[in-house]
Every structure is written in C-alpha cells, then in structure tokens.
Image (cartoon, coloured by chain):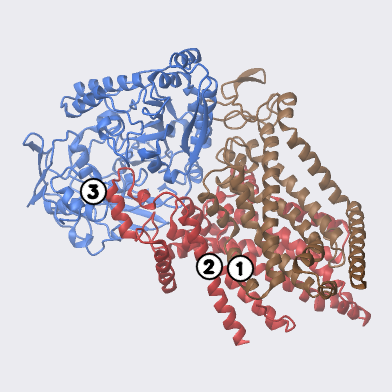
Chain colours: A red, B blue, C brown
Amino acid sequence: MTVTIARRLALSVVVLVIVCAITFVIFFAVPGKPAELIAGKYATPQTVALIEKRLGLDQPKPLQFLRFITHAARGDWGFSYVSQQPVLPTILVAFPKTLSLTLGALAIWILLGVPVGILSALKPGSVWDRMAMVGALVGISMPAYWIGLLFLRLFADLLGWFPLGDYEEIARAGVSGWAHHLALPWVTLALLYAGWYARMTRAQMLDVARLDYVRTAYAKGLSRRAVVGRHILRNALLPLVTMLGMDVAYLLGGAVLTESVFGIPGIGGLAWRAIRMRDLPMVMGTVLFAAVFIVLANLIVDLIYCALDPRIQADA
Amino acid sequence: MFVREEDPDYLDPALSYGLYSAPVTEAIFHTLLDYQGVPGPAGARLIPDLAEALPDVRESGTLYCFRVRREARFGAPLHRHITAADFKYSIERLFKVSSPGVNFYRHIVGADRVLAGRDSLLQGVIARGDSLYIRLTKPDPVFLHIVSMTFTAPLPREIAEPYARTFSQHTVASGPFQVAEFVPRRHVILVRNPDYCGTPAWLDTFELRLGVSAINGVALIRRGLADGGFFEVPPAEYARLRADSVWRGRISVDDGLETDFLFFNVRKAPFNDPRVRQAICWAVDRRALLKAYSGKGRIAGEFLPPGMPGARPLGRYAGPDLRRARQLLAAAGYPRGFRTRLYGYTAEPIPRLLTIVQQQLADVGIRADLDMGEAVGYTSMAQDTSNHVPFGYYAWTADYVDPSNFFDTLLNGRRITATNNNDLSLFDDPDVNDRIERAMTTADDSARARLWREVDERVMDQAPVLPLVHIYESRLYGVRLGGWYRHVTRLLKIEDLYLKSPRSGAARRGSP
Amino acid sequence: MTTATSVSIEAGDLEASRQRSALADAARRFAADRWALAGMVFLSLLLLLALGAPWIATHVLHASAYRLAMMDQIQVHGRPVEVVSAEGVPVGPNVRFTLGADLIGRDVLARILYGARISLLVSTLGTLLAVLLGLAVGLLAGFYRGVVDAILSRFIDAMMAIPILLLAIALASVLRGGSVWTVVLILGLVNWTYLARILRAEVLSLREKEFIEAARALGAGDRRILARHVLPNLAGPLLVFATLSMAGNILLESALSFLGVGIQSPTPSWGNMIQEGMGFYTVAWWITLFPGLAILLTVVSLNLVGDGLKDALMPGSRARSRP
C-alpha cells in the first residue's frame, strides 16, 4: 500500500511539472514584452532593459523555467509583473473568496441534486421523475454567466433583495452580510451542478438496482427500504464522491465566469486578469495552484478506490 | 464614506500613478506647491503650499530656488520639521524605485547619470537647511507644474529607507490627511493631520471602502449608505440617473481633459495624401460615436480638449458630409475608395466605436478591416514605428494641465523615436513643430493660448489625427455631501469636502 | 482458398452482420425516444434557420445583423424615437426590431440567426478536431500500452489538471485573433483529453476480447485489427461523446466569447452578444436575454439527442438516462 502511495505521489509531482511546462510553453509563444507594460507610457528603451534585467527576463527560457521550478518548490512563486506583489500571498488572499463561493454552492447543490436524484430513481417514470429530470437537463444546459445576469437583474436590480455583486468579508460584515452577498452566486453555481448530480445519482441508483447482488437481497426478503439504504445508496454514491472531488478541485482553481459576473475577487478573477495582462508569474501561480488541487483530488480518489475495492489494481 | 473597487495602486507618492488613486495620495502627500482649490480653469493656478512662496527663478529659467516653510512638519509618527533634504531624498528616490514619474524629471542636471546607474545622488538638486535649489539642463516653462506633482512630496529618509517596498503601510503624511489604517482590499481610513501647516480639512475622517464595484457603488450612494466613490459612473446607470430629477444634479460631469482620436500614418499611402485624411474627417459622424460613450462627452472639432485653460472649441469638420468626402477621395485618386486596416483594442467602448467608424467609412467606399488586439500590448505595438500601423485608435488624457502635453508629446515631429514613439502619426511638419516650440517658451498666458490655438487650427487642417470625442468624467455624489467639484488637475480635493448638516444644509465640521 | 482464410472471412462476415443488426436495433430504440426526437427536430430547425439566415434577415425581417441603424428613427407609440438614444440606450422589441436592437442599432434576431451559424460551425469543427486527436491518442495509448501508454497518460493527466477555461483563455490570448479557426483549434485542443481517456479504457477492455485474439491468431496485423475490429466498436462511445461534446462546445465557445477571447465582434456569436449587452442589462435586457435563450435551447436539444444516443447505442450497460 505504501509503495502505491509513494508511486502515486511521485507521479503527481511529475504531472505538476508537466503542467508548469505546458503553461510556460504557451506563454512564451506570446509576442510582446511584459517589461514594456510595467514601464508605462513614457518608457524609454533603457528603462525597459533595466526592468527586464531586474526581473530576469533577459535570460534564456529554459533557465527561466528551471529557476521557476526550483523557487516554486521552496515556496517562492515569484512576483507579479503587474503589481510587483509576491504571487503566492496574493493567491492565498484571493483563495478564501473562491473557497467561500465553492463551499456554499457545494452545500446547496448536494442538498438539492442528490435527494432529487434519489427520489427520481425510486419512482422512475413518474411525474416527479419527469419534471425533475427536465429541470436537471435545463440546469446543465444553461450558460452560467447568463443565468447569473438574469438573477442579478431580477433579484438585485428590480427587486433589490440582494446586492449587485461584490464580495463581503465575514470580518467586515458578519456572517449575514457575507452570505447575503454570496447568495446569488451560490445559487447560480449550484443550479448548474445540481443538475449533473441529480442525473448522475439517478443513473447510478438505477444501475446498481439492476445488479445481481441487489436482486439477491430482494429475493432474500429484505424490505425495499433496507435494500435501498444498505446496498444501493452506498454503492451508487461512491462514484458521486469521486465526481464531487473532481468538481470541487476544479472550482477551487477558480470559477472564472461566476466570479467575473458577480465581481468576486477570487482566484478565477486573478487568473483571468493575469492571462490577459500577460503576467506570467501570476499565471503560472494560479495554474499551478489549481493543478495542485486537481492532482490532489485525483490522488485521494485513486487511493480511496484502492482501499475500498481490492479488485481494482493500480495501473501503469 | 467613499467606495471604490480596486485598491489604490500604492500609497507611496513615488509609485502612485493612477487616475483613481490620485485624490487619496494627494490628500496625504503635499509638496512645495499646490493648485488653488476652486473649480474651473482658475484651479490651474499654483500657490505655495509647503514652500513659503512661489520660487525664485534665476539664470534664465534654469535655476529654481525654493524655501521650505518653517512650520512645515511631517505627521505621525515623526512630527518633525520638513527640511529641504527631505525633498531632495524624495526626488532621488524616484530614480531608485523606478517610479513611473521618472521621465518628468529627466532634465534636472545629473538625472541622466543617476538613470544610468553611475550616480546615486542627484547633482542638480541642492538642499541647504530650508533652502532647496533645482538646476535644469534647459529652461522649461511648465516645470512648476511638474514640481507640483505628488512625485516630489517630501519623504523622511528614516522611515522610507527601512520600509523600501512597503512604504504604503508606513506612510508619513505631509498633507492635510494622514493614514490611520490601510487594510488592502478592505479600506483606507484617513484622519485629519494636525501637523499640516496649511488650511485644515473640514472632515475629521474619510473612509474609502475597497472592493465595491461601480454598479454597487451607485446603488449604495442612491440608498444613502455611501457619499461618493472613485469610479466612473457606468453608462447604463448614467442613463438612468440622468432621467431622475433628484439625481441628475448629483452627477458631476466635467471635462476629463481627454481626447479620443484616430491617427493616420502620414508616411504610408494612402494616408500620406492630406485629402484622403480630410475625406475621412468629413465622412465620420461623430454624433453617432458619442452615443457609444453614452453621451458622456462632446464632439471634438479640435484636438485640444476645451477644458484646457485657454482652449476654445474650433468646430472643424462639422459633418458628416459624405459628398465632400467622396469628392476629396476622387481628387486624391481614389474614386472607388480603398482598403485598409483599422487598429484598436478590446476595452469598452472601443469595439463598438470602431464598428461604427467602419460602417461610416464603408459608406464612402473605404473598406476598413478591424484589427482588435488586447489592451495590454496595444500601446507598445502602436508606438513601435517598425510596425507601420496605418490607421488606428488612440486616446490621450492630460498628464498635466498644459497644451504642450497634447501637442508637443503627440504631434511634434522632432520627438519621433523608433520605439516608445508617441507621435503615432509620424507627423512632422516644420511649421507646426516651430509653432509648438515657440508656444512652449512663451511666458505670457494669453499669447501662449493664442499660439496653441493656431497650432490646433493647423493640425486640424492637415488632419494627421481625427479627433472624435472629448470625454467627460462623471462622478456620483451622495445627498449629504458638500464641497465637491471637479478640480482641473487634482480631480477631487478631499480636504474641501464636508457633510451637510441635516437641518440647515450649511457646512459643518465633523466626521460622518 | 485455404480453410484459414475462409474461416477468417466467415468470422469477419459474422462480425459485420452482427454490427449491422446492432445498428438497426439502436436506430429503432432511438426513434422510440420522444424527447430525443424532439431534440432532433429542434436541431434540424436550427440548422435550417442558420443556413437560411442571410435570406431570412433580408426578406423576412428586413433587418441586418451587421448594418448599424443608430441614427435611424422609428415610431414608438406614435412618436419618432431614435433607434439608439443619445445616452446609448437602444430600443426594445417592437415592430421593426423583433427582439429589439443592440447597442449600436443592429437587429438582435438577425444576429441570433447569424450567431447560430457560427455556434454550430465552431462547435462541430471543434468536436471533430477533438475526436481526431482523442481517437489518435486514445487508440495509441490503449492498444500499445507500456511505455507509450505511460507517457501519453501522464500527458493527458497534466492537460486535464489545468482547468479547461483557464487553458482555453490562455490559448486564446496566445493565438491572437478572434477568428473562427482559432476558436475551433482551442475547442479541439481543450476537449480531446476526455475522449482520449474514454477511448483508452474502451480499447484496453476490447483488447482482451476473443475476436481480437482470434484475428491475431489468424495473422492479422495491427492496422487491420484496429480498422476492422477495434474502431467499429468504438463508434458508439464516439458518437455519444461527439454529441455531448458539441453541447459542451457551444457552452464553452460562448463562455470564451463572453470573456472576450472567443469570436470577436462584429461577427455575431451568442456569447459575445451577451457580453456586449452585459454592461446594459439593467436598461436593455433583451440584448442578453435572447442569445442566452438560444444557447439554452440548443444545448438542451443536443443533450436530449446525446442521451437518446447513449440509451440507443449502449443499452445493456446502463439504465435509460431519462424517463
């Protein structure tokens, strides 16, 4: 088991390095010098050269990459070209906002999607099932930013029940203020995922219900409730947990669309601005940050599966 | 209490250079001279602030002699007298921290050596006790304006040195306010600085809440939860507020000293023929373009924004006149028009703007393909002459209140450089160049204004640029706030703000 | 003919006829699914509208997706009103502009029709590219295993570790230009990893099946095995993936255009229409509402069809996706 863990970890690190390399390559195909951006309107070639030297931009690219990797491993993720602030602390400051958004939405979509899926699976073909699945379908087909704008127009602008975006810290406005500002973004994000989870839950439960050992359980005379509770649910929900891990990991990397519509200064906004401003250190930082979560989630999920189902061997 | 979405870029007078951070930085850091606190063009008059009087100018304009006021003192935590050495230290620091303002001070004697790294002290700035002498390599009639920029605000070496990168958290004030608290992304709280030797501010406390977007800012101001904000009123809100009888009076709409224009590369066919350029000037319907700005501006019939002291609208090319445009094109040898590329970038409302221009040009046979890049790289791309950009969009806001900032920087052919070139048209007319340089050295105000107007007329004749719209700035102010006005250079002087007492509406000292 | 060859021909024929009847079954199952049919109907309608957009705009709507009518005047409640007001606010749905005008006086409905062309074209081509890439990599990794698989899998992992949207934005910023081809390239580059993984898993399981062993025993080379035995069995997952991927691509392309790094104005795309109208959603809601509805209906239809295909082509493995 430890060998597996160690091997997985090593592979994960390799993956992270490849992620950095991909990002690096993408960005060095870009024309335009970031030093000119920093120097500003009245820059002279000398100022630009000085800035390039200070930031180490005049060195060969492979060297810059190596420098980044070695520094990153130590926790120094460089300084933003645009704001001159250190990258990792900036990301960490933005992280709680993304985390707030993700966790709140997560709570809503699980509480909404999974029960709906379960109920639908218990009464397949009923009116409830039909309506629920239509709803779920609509949920997964909506553009997130569009529905966000719609909510803003309806609930914030016309009705005035919610603020028009922005993020409020707990420290400043208390939990109620924080939640009040996040309510619409939470619902927007949750609607999308609730649809997926409702469908997945239903599909999984129906699948498991057809399996042999479930039929055996029924044949043995167990009540429906017992069968559902003891066998179906547990096995159906396992893949959902996997999906959850991945979804959360992706969201923690920054939900660019929702954050931009609602003006939440999270990692999504950071990454988005960094990419457009060609702020390479910040781009590397946000991509790496997001990748860490995803790789971590993958690792945990793989290990859970290994532990729970010895039939599945760790593959190459 | 004001609101703002982004943090001030720095609370460091050397590094702060944003339109929206300026009022805050300018409230904390004052320097030798300041602008008179009145609305309108009279606000461009300089008066002594930390200096005893306007400086003695000797040696035919190359030596400026200032005396620091005896009562001038730094605020907390130092409370000590400000000496000339503090000014010298501050100016030298600009070079050390690569301040964006460094280029304004390049003609101080010794600046080139410091810039090249061969010297750490600036020879041309001499401090002796309370006397400050600044020596220039050549006379500059706008030097007083340059000295009044916050870049020269004095800084105490004993605090600025140890906190080199983090001065924003350890500010020492020289102006009417000092920083009580700056929590990034949360707020900036200013309190009145009792050590300031000039007229004290009305407000006790000024809070700037960060992280509030413009649209929320408007909502908060309307509900009375905020008194104002450092943001441009968003166009949709602007339209709504103007329709409301109460609120239309609370929007401050002022000349932003900005001209949005199209430039033609006069060295590249077909724009090398002035008739082609004039034809395009007649083809463009600026009234439609103004709609893309939500009406927040005025049609530009001249290059210099009329908000500049001494400037007057010229009303040129009051069109559109498509017949005349087609005649000119035919006369220049393009009876069926031609094809070209129009460059711009993707900041609002430029894509819409250029789409409108594109259609207007198509109506006279000119097919302009749009090339929209990212805002980030656009300026350096356009400023690189080897790119031969033929036709593009540009906007210029005054860095300081003098027409030379427009004409000399953007249209003086003698300033053309290979890269970082600001004369995007590569316009080089010896007559215009001479007039520009003559205007810059003329001392008499009205004569100078007349000379600049002549430059403007000639520029509009030759049309290396097609001015589209002069942009207005709009700010929204809450119901209980008084003392707000748009200052021509300082934008908003926080020290002049006060809260109206709910009963009488008269000024009242006190905190919000 | 030797016995061996005749046996192989028989085996091949048997398999071919097996595949044919499977296809017929699938088609029947699909036709019985009412929702999937509804989706097909909508998509066909959309395709027709998209193809006929120029004609419809000119002859039916008398409007233009490109021509600006900013300074024109129309009658609203008997009074002349400028299509775009001095403050930049356009008119809403009325007699002349069926779904309203956008911020510079273009007809929203006409633009939605043209936008359909773009959305359908871009998502189809993007899916095609993703399928080609995913197929290539998935096949190689699953079939050859070993070192090839190890390297490819790590590469896939790495690409999947970068959030799609960020990757797309980064690529878009780099490949300057909002042209259709750039967006197609991005969509393809971003989506292939999912297919590669699915196909790899399928190929890995197929490898072990008997008919592959049989074919090998008869001396068939790698390429023949791939072409005649492996590929046809991948058709099912491929088709399902393609449809669902098209749905995802429409959403992704609109997201990119919304963020300003996809299709650029003046080419209308549903995403960039929403983006243009975003600043004015309080006073001109029609500019954002209708393109979004178009996206919603199209994606719902694609999902319905995709679900139907999944149920039709892969019946034994799972319960029906929908009641």
* Secondary structure under the numbered disc 2 in the rendered image: helix
Q: Name the residue under label 3.
A: B175
Q: Name the residue under label 1.
A: C157
Q: In this view, does C271 lie to the left or right of B245?
A: right
Give the foreground label among 3 and 1.
1
**Dots 1, 2 in contact, CB < 8 A:** yes
Question: B467 or B256: which is nearer to us?
Answer: B467
* Secondary structure under the numbered disc 1 in the rendered image: helix
What amino acid does circle 1 point to? Answer: Asp
Q: Mark 2 points at which residue?
A: A18
The numbered mark 2 sits on a residue in which chain?
A: A
* Secondary structure under the numbered disc 3 in the rendered image: loop
Residue at the location (78% across, 57% down)? C240
Question: B367 or B143: which is nearer to us?
Answer: B367
What amino acid does circle 3 point to? Answer: Gly
Q: Can residue C8 be seen in this view?
A: yes
Q: In this view, does B431 lie to the left or right of A226?
A: left
The numbered mark 1 sits on a residue in which chain?
A: C
